[in-house]
Amino acid sequence: MEIEKLLHESIDAAIKAGLAILDVYYSDYSVEYKSDDSPLTIADQRAHDIISEILGKTNIPILSEEGRNIDYAERKKWDTLWVVDPLDGTKEFIKRNDEFTVNIALVKNNTPVLGVIFVPVTSTLYFAAEGLGAWKFNDSDLVNRIGKMVFQKPEPEIFEMVLSRSVTLPLKVRTDEASCRIVGSRSHSTPELEAYVNQKKKEYPAVGFLSAGSSLKFCLVAEGEADIYPRLGPTMEWDTAAGQAIAEQSGCQVLCWDTGAPLAYNREDLLNPYFVVSRPENE
Protein backbone atom coordinates (compact mmCIF):
# COMPACT_ATOMS: atom_id res chain seq x y z
CA MET A 1 0.00 0.00 0.00
CA GLU A 2 1.53 3.32 -1.04
CA ILE A 3 2.60 5.69 1.72
CA GLU A 4 0.06 8.38 0.79
CA LYS A 5 -2.78 5.88 1.23
CA LEU A 6 -1.35 4.78 4.57
CA LEU A 7 -1.17 8.43 5.61
CA HIS A 8 -4.87 8.80 4.80
CA GLU A 9 -5.69 5.75 6.90
CA SER A 10 -3.66 6.96 9.85
CA ILE A 11 -5.15 10.47 9.75
CA ASP A 12 -8.63 8.92 9.69
CA ALA A 13 -7.76 6.68 12.66
CA ALA A 14 -6.17 9.49 14.68
CA ILE A 15 -9.12 11.85 14.24
CA LYS A 16 -11.76 9.24 15.03
CA ALA A 17 -9.80 8.11 18.11
CA GLY A 18 -9.28 11.71 19.20
CA LEU A 19 -12.96 12.57 19.01
CA ALA A 20 -13.80 9.45 21.02
CA ILE A 21 -11.28 10.60 23.63
CA LEU A 22 -13.03 13.97 23.83
CA ASP A 23 -16.35 12.26 24.60
CA VAL A 24 -14.70 10.82 27.71
CA TYR A 25 -12.71 13.97 28.51
CA TYR A 26 -15.86 16.05 28.88
CA SER A 27 -17.62 13.45 31.04
CA ASP A 28 -17.19 11.96 34.50
CA TYR A 29 -14.78 9.05 34.18
CA SER A 30 -12.77 6.80 36.46
CA VAL A 31 -9.02 6.30 36.47
CA GLU A 32 -7.36 2.92 36.88
CA TYR A 33 -3.67 2.15 37.21
CA LYS A 34 -1.52 -0.32 35.29
CA SER A 35 1.04 -2.62 36.89
CA ASP A 36 3.70 0.10 36.48
CA ASP A 37 1.45 2.63 38.30
CA SER A 38 0.82 4.63 35.13
CA PRO A 39 -2.78 5.86 34.80
CA LEU A 40 -5.34 4.36 32.42
CA THR A 41 -8.82 5.61 31.51
CA ILE A 42 -11.59 4.29 29.33
CA ALA A 43 -10.47 6.88 26.78
CA ASP A 44 -7.18 5.01 26.25
CA GLN A 45 -9.00 1.77 25.52
CA ARG A 46 -11.62 3.30 23.25
CA ALA A 47 -8.94 5.04 21.21
CA HIS A 48 -6.92 1.83 21.02
CA ASP A 49 -9.92 -0.12 19.74
CA ILE A 50 -10.74 2.46 17.04
CA ILE A 51 -7.16 2.69 15.80
CA SER A 52 -6.73 -1.09 15.82
CA GLU A 53 -9.90 -1.56 13.79
CA ILE A 54 -8.93 1.00 11.13
CA LEU A 55 -5.23 0.21 10.85
CA GLY A 56 -5.86 -3.53 11.16
CA LYS A 57 -7.29 -3.43 7.64
CA THR A 58 -3.85 -2.47 6.29
CA ASN A 59 -2.51 -5.92 7.30
CA ILE A 60 0.49 -4.23 8.91
CA PRO A 61 1.19 -5.36 12.50
CA ILE A 62 0.54 -2.86 15.29
CA LEU A 63 2.69 -2.15 18.34
CA SER A 64 0.57 -0.10 20.73
CA GLU A 65 0.96 1.04 24.31
CA GLU A 66 -2.33 -0.69 25.09
CA GLY A 67 -1.14 -3.90 23.38
CA ARG A 68 2.53 -3.86 24.27
CA ASN A 69 2.97 -7.45 25.38
CA ILE A 70 4.12 -8.88 22.07
CA ASP A 71 7.16 -11.11 22.37
CA TYR A 72 10.31 -9.84 20.65
CA ALA A 73 10.74 -13.20 18.97
CA GLU A 74 7.61 -12.29 17.00
CA ARG A 75 8.26 -8.55 16.62
CA LYS A 76 11.78 -8.92 15.24
CA LYS A 77 10.28 -10.51 12.13
CA TRP A 78 8.46 -7.27 11.34
CA ASP A 79 10.28 -5.00 8.91
CA THR A 80 7.21 -2.73 8.76
CA LEU A 81 4.85 -1.95 11.65
CA TRP A 82 2.57 0.68 13.11
CA VAL A 83 3.74 2.18 16.42
CA VAL A 84 0.80 3.72 18.23
CA ASP A 85 0.04 5.60 21.42
CA PRO A 86 -3.77 5.91 21.51
CA LEU A 87 -3.60 8.58 24.23
CA ASP A 88 -0.22 10.17 24.80
CA GLY A 89 -0.26 12.34 27.90
CA THR A 90 -2.75 10.51 30.09
CA LYS A 91 -1.51 12.56 33.05
CA GLU A 92 -2.29 15.74 31.11
CA PHE A 93 -5.70 14.27 30.25
CA ILE A 94 -6.43 13.61 33.93
CA LYS A 95 -5.22 17.10 34.90
CA ARG A 96 -7.54 18.48 32.17
CA ASN A 97 -4.90 20.82 30.78
CA ASP A 98 -5.73 19.84 27.15
CA GLU A 99 -2.13 18.80 26.28
CA PHE A 100 -2.72 15.21 25.21
CA THR A 101 -2.45 13.67 21.77
CA VAL A 102 -3.06 10.64 19.59
CA ASN A 103 0.19 9.34 18.07
CA ILE A 104 0.42 7.05 15.04
CA ALA A 105 3.64 6.19 13.22
CA LEU A 106 4.67 3.81 10.48
CA VAL A 107 8.11 2.29 11.04
CA LYS A 108 10.09 0.62 8.25
CA ASN A 109 13.41 -1.06 8.92
CA ASN A 110 13.58 0.51 12.41
CA THR A 111 12.96 4.07 11.10
CA PRO A 112 9.75 6.13 11.37
CA VAL A 113 8.72 7.06 7.82
CA LEU A 114 5.23 8.39 8.57
CA GLY A 115 3.81 10.18 11.57
CA VAL A 116 0.47 11.61 12.65
CA ILE A 117 -0.14 13.54 15.86
CA PHE A 118 -3.66 14.75 16.58
CA VAL A 119 -4.46 17.21 19.38
CA PRO A 120 -8.17 16.59 20.06
CA VAL A 121 -9.02 19.68 22.14
CA THR A 122 -7.74 22.13 19.50
CA SER A 123 -8.51 19.99 16.41
CA THR A 124 -4.86 20.41 15.43
CA LEU A 125 -3.23 17.78 13.25
CA TYR A 126 0.47 17.37 12.53
CA PHE A 127 1.41 14.83 9.89
CA ALA A 128 4.39 13.81 7.79
CA ALA A 129 5.60 11.10 5.47
CA GLU A 130 8.71 10.39 3.44
CA GLY A 131 8.45 12.18 0.12
CA LEU A 132 5.51 14.30 1.28
CA GLY A 133 7.15 16.53 3.90
CA ALA A 134 5.71 17.70 7.22
CA TRP A 135 2.48 19.63 7.68
CA LYS A 136 0.23 21.30 10.25
CA PHE A 137 -3.55 21.43 9.85
CA ASN A 138 -6.25 23.07 11.94
CA ASP A 139 -9.87 23.06 10.81
CA SER A 140 -12.42 21.85 13.35
CA ASP A 141 -15.24 21.67 10.78
CA LEU A 142 -13.32 19.34 8.51
CA VAL A 143 -12.04 17.33 11.49
CA ASN A 144 -15.62 16.75 12.65
CA ARG A 145 -16.65 15.83 9.12
CA ILE A 146 -13.98 13.13 8.97
CA GLY A 147 -14.84 11.96 12.48
CA LYS A 148 -18.51 11.45 11.61
CA MET A 149 -17.74 9.17 8.66
CA VAL A 150 -18.31 6.08 10.78
CA PHE A 151 -19.76 3.70 8.24
CA GLN A 152 -17.69 4.64 5.25
CA LYS A 153 -14.12 5.47 4.50
CA PRO A 154 -13.41 9.15 3.91
CA GLU A 155 -13.08 9.84 0.20
CA PRO A 156 -9.66 10.82 -1.19
CA GLU A 157 -11.08 14.28 -1.87
CA ILE A 158 -11.38 14.83 1.87
CA PHE A 159 -7.65 14.36 2.29
CA GLU A 160 -6.94 16.62 -0.65
CA MET A 161 -8.89 19.24 1.29
CA VAL A 162 -6.80 18.53 4.40
CA LEU A 163 -3.60 19.00 2.42
CA SER A 164 -4.85 22.16 0.71
CA ARG A 165 -5.69 23.70 4.10
CA SER A 166 -2.40 22.69 5.74
CA VAL A 167 0.83 24.62 6.06
CA THR A 168 4.31 23.16 5.68
CA LEU A 169 6.72 22.90 8.58
CA PRO A 170 8.71 24.67 9.86
CA LEU A 171 6.52 27.74 10.24
CA LYS A 172 9.34 29.79 11.78
CA VAL A 173 13.10 29.85 11.41
CA ARG A 174 15.52 30.94 14.06
CA THR A 175 16.78 34.49 13.57
CA ASP A 176 18.34 35.33 16.95
CA GLU A 177 21.58 33.41 17.42
CA ALA A 178 22.01 34.88 20.89
CA SER A 179 19.00 33.07 22.30
CA CYS A 180 17.99 29.45 22.76
CA ARG A 181 14.44 28.19 23.27
CA ILE A 182 14.29 24.84 25.06
CA VAL A 183 11.11 22.79 25.38
CA GLY A 184 10.69 20.20 28.10
CA SER A 185 8.14 18.02 29.78
CA ARG A 186 5.35 19.54 31.83
CA SER A 187 4.94 16.45 34.02
CA HIS A 188 8.32 14.67 33.88
CA SER A 189 11.10 17.10 34.77
CA THR A 190 14.43 15.53 35.79
CA PRO A 191 17.66 16.75 37.44
CA GLU A 192 19.43 16.00 34.13
CA LEU A 193 17.12 18.38 32.29
CA GLU A 194 17.66 21.09 34.89
CA ALA A 195 21.43 20.68 34.53
CA TYR A 196 21.12 20.89 30.74
CA VAL A 197 19.14 24.13 30.94
CA ASN A 198 21.68 25.62 33.35
CA GLN A 199 24.50 24.72 30.96
CA LYS A 200 22.71 26.43 28.06
CA LYS A 201 22.32 29.55 30.20
CA LYS A 202 26.13 29.72 30.31
CA GLU A 203 26.31 29.43 26.51
CA TYR A 204 23.55 31.88 25.51
CA PRO A 205 22.73 35.39 26.80
CA ALA A 206 19.04 34.51 26.71
CA VAL A 207 17.51 31.08 27.31
CA GLY A 208 13.78 30.48 27.23
CA PHE A 209 12.10 27.37 28.56
CA LEU A 210 8.75 26.13 27.32
CA SER A 211 6.76 23.42 29.07
CA ALA A 212 4.51 21.13 27.07
CA GLY A 213 2.83 17.79 27.54
CA SER A 214 2.90 14.63 25.45
CA SER A 215 4.36 14.59 21.91
CA LEU A 216 3.65 18.32 21.52
CA LYS A 217 7.31 18.94 22.36
CA PHE A 218 8.35 17.33 19.05
CA CYS A 219 5.80 19.48 17.25
CA LEU A 220 7.07 22.71 18.80
CA VAL A 221 10.57 22.03 17.48
CA ALA A 222 9.25 20.85 14.11
CA GLU A 223 7.27 24.04 13.57
CA GLY A 224 10.04 26.31 14.86
CA GLU A 225 8.47 27.47 18.12
CA ALA A 226 11.37 25.89 20.04
CA ASP A 227 15.00 25.26 19.10
CA ILE A 228 15.71 22.08 21.00
CA TYR A 229 13.97 19.34 22.96
CA PRO A 230 16.34 17.37 25.20
CA ARG A 231 14.59 14.29 26.54
CA LEU A 232 16.67 13.32 29.54
CA GLY A 233 14.15 11.01 31.09
CA PRO A 234 12.33 7.78 30.24
CA THR A 235 10.10 7.39 27.18
CA MET A 236 8.79 4.40 25.28
CA GLU A 237 8.84 3.86 21.52
CA TRP A 238 5.14 4.71 21.12
CA ASP A 239 5.75 8.05 22.85
CA THR A 240 8.23 9.19 20.22
CA ALA A 241 7.84 7.45 16.84
CA ALA A 242 5.20 9.79 15.36
CA GLY A 243 6.94 12.88 16.70
CA GLN A 244 10.25 11.74 15.28
CA ALA A 245 8.76 11.26 11.81
CA ILE A 246 7.25 14.75 11.88
CA ALA A 247 10.41 16.36 13.25
CA GLU A 248 12.70 14.64 10.75
CA GLN A 249 10.48 15.39 7.76
CA SER A 250 10.49 19.06 8.82
CA GLY A 251 14.29 19.08 8.68
CA CYS A 252 15.11 18.28 12.31
CA GLN A 253 17.17 15.45 13.71
CA VAL A 254 16.37 13.10 16.59
CA LEU A 255 19.60 11.71 17.99
CA CYS A 256 20.50 9.51 20.94
CA TRP A 257 22.11 11.48 23.75
CA ASP A 258 25.07 9.14 24.25
CA THR A 259 25.84 7.91 20.74
CA GLY A 260 24.57 10.61 18.38
CA ALA A 261 22.85 7.92 16.31
CA PRO A 262 19.25 8.36 15.15
CA LEU A 263 16.67 6.94 17.53
CA ALA A 264 15.69 3.48 16.23
CA TYR A 265 12.53 1.42 16.68
CA ASN A 266 11.18 -2.09 17.23
CA ARG A 267 14.10 -2.83 19.51
CA GLU A 268 14.04 -5.69 21.99
CA ASP A 269 13.89 -3.14 24.82
CA LEU A 270 11.09 -0.71 24.01
CA LEU A 271 12.40 1.82 26.53
CA ASN A 272 14.12 4.63 24.63
CA PRO A 273 17.56 5.97 25.49
CA TYR A 274 17.85 9.69 26.24
CA PHE A 275 17.70 11.76 23.06
CA VAL A 276 17.72 15.31 21.68
CA VAL A 277 15.48 16.84 19.01
CA SER A 278 16.95 19.84 17.22
CA ARG A 279 17.31 21.61 13.91
CA PRO A 280 20.95 21.23 12.76
CA GLU A 281 21.33 24.89 11.79
CA ASN A 282 20.27 25.93 15.30
CA GLU A 283 23.09 24.12 17.07
Image (cartoon, rainbow, N blue to C red):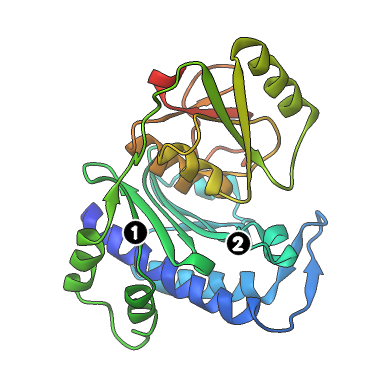
Q: Is mark 1 on a helix, strand or loop?
A: strand
Q: Which disc is residue 137 wearing?
A: 1
Instruction: Tell me the kind of residue under disc 2.
Output: Gly
Judge depth for marks 2 and 1 and give the one in front: 1
Q: Residues within 10 Å of mark 2 (few under 14, many from 20)?
A: few
Instruction: Locate residue 282: give its quadrant.
Output: top left
Q: Name the residue under label 2.
A: 67
Residue 51 pos. (x, y %): 47, 69
Whether residue 128 is visible:
yes
Q: Position of residue 19 (x, y in %)?
A: 49, 76
Q: Where is residue 72 in the image (x, y as percent from the top left)?
A: 58, 45
Q: Is 51 drawn above or below residue 127 in the view shown?
A: below
Q: Which of marks 2 and 1 is nearer the N terminus?
A: 2
Image position of 171 (left or right of 186)? left
Percent x, y of residue 167 = 28, 51
Quarter assignment of residue 195: top right
The image quadrant where one finds the N terminus is bottom left
Q: Residues within 10 Å of mark 1 (few under 14, many from 20)?
A: some
Residue placed most toward the observer, 69 or 17: 17
Real-space Cα distance between discs 2 and 1? 29 Å
Q: Is residue 187 left or right of residue 111?
A: right
Residue in view at x 33 percent, y 81 percent: 145
Q: Helix, strand or loop at disc 2?
A: helix
